[in-house]
Image (spheres, rainbow, N blue to C red):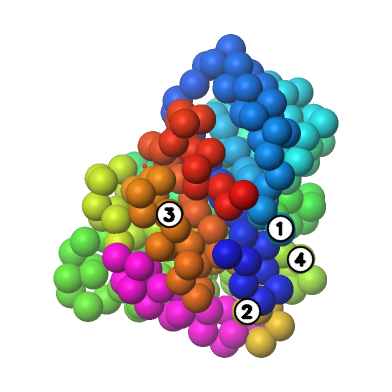
Amino acid sequence: MKKDARPFIVAANWKMHKSPREAGEFLKSFVAQTNKRSLGGDCEVVFFVPAIDLMVAAESLRDSQVKWGAQNCYFEMKGAFTGETSPAVLSEIGAHYTLVGHSERRAIFHESDAETGKKVKALQGVGIVPMLCVGETLAEREAGRTNEVILRQLRAGLEHRDTNKNVVIAYEPVWAIGTGKVATPQQANDAHVALRQGLKDLGGDGFSRVTPILYGGSVKPENAAELGAQSEIDGFLVGGASLEIATFLPLIPG
Ligand code: PEP
């Protein structure tokens, strides 16, 4: 599953699901089960938990090989920003990754391309790896604008990036998120090929070779193997199927 110089990453996006008690029970049980089997070579597992569960994730995953992070953050470190989460605090409590620009943030909370760029910069500045989400709507795909949209989001998200630090990209066609409609392996890989070229144009060969591009959108045990076998797919960002250990564990190469 691992390609070139990139790890294979399987990431859970719990969205607004699970209380601290539920998160703690899930993560402890998950660690107990993954300790019984090895994660496949160069495979990383990440949980993006609700903000209120972050400390529980830090505690529950402390001595494990499993990483965790936030689903969103602000681009300032502190101040009068009611309701926001500071990248500096995420770093202090040990977050490894944080999502930026998930389609629900863009569509429901009106997060702009420009804000995603500032968040990527802020996260890298405190040593957290941003996972930048890009993806087209159904109307954009049907109008033949998929590559134009995802490359615009890629360029804006990476506009202020630190060229010495890592970033991860997640391609998530909006029409495939939470709908049960999965992109075909070919549709997904074509978008990943365009993004890989976009990374090359922005940061050269080396940058494009080491930057993982995950696929997200109704990934489940029945379609994971075929998607993961595609040449440019370096893992998954998983919503619905990450809420139960029984449907998340089979997505992780063993
Ligand atoms: C997501 O939330 O990023 C996602 C891909 O959700 P789902 O797997 O449920 O489509």
- Asked whether mark 2 and ligand 1 are closer than 8 Å, the reply comes as no
Using the image, determine if residue 87 lies above or below residue 233: above
Q: Is residue 195 left or right of residue 158?
A: left
- Which of the two discs, 1 and 2, sits closer to the camera? 1
* Residue 27 pos. (x, y %): 63, 26
Instruction: For marks 3 and 2, give the CA distance.
Output: 23 Å
Specify which label sits upstream in the sequence, 4 or 3: 4
Instruction: For marks 4 and 3, give the CA distance.
Output: 29 Å
Specify which label sits upstream in the sequence, 2 or 4: 4
- Which of the two discs, 4 and 3, sits closer to the camera? 3
**Amino acid at dot 2:** Ser
Instruction: For marks 2 and 4, give the CA distance.
Output: 13 Å
Could you tell me if the residues under marks 2 and 4 are in contact, i.e. CB atoms within 8 Å? no
Secondary structure state at the residue bearing disc 1: loop
Instruction: Write the start and end of the magenta stretch as one range.
Output: 184-203
Which residue, given by chain and number where applicable, does mark 3 sit on? 224
Q: Is residue 202 visible?
A: no
User: Was residue 159 drawn as part of the magenta stretch in this picture?
Assistant: no
Mark 3 burial class by Cα count in 10 Å: few <14, some 14-19, many 20+: some
Secondary structure state at the residue bearing disc 2: helix
Q: Report the magenta stretch's main SS.
A: helix
Identify the residue shown where x is 29% and y is 65%. 184
Instruction: For marks 3 and 1, give the CA distance.
Output: 17 Å
> Disc number at residue 245?
none
**Amino acid at dot 1:** Gly
> Disc number at residue 165?
4
Which residue, given by chain and number where applicable, does mark 2 sit on? 208
- Which of the two discs, 2 and 4, sits closer to the camera? 2
Specify which label sits upstream in the sequence, 1 or 2: 1
- Which of the two discs, 4 and 1, sits closer to the camera? 1
Q: In the rendered view of the protein, which quadrant contains the N terminus?
A: bottom right
Identify the residue shown where x is 38% and y is 37%. 240
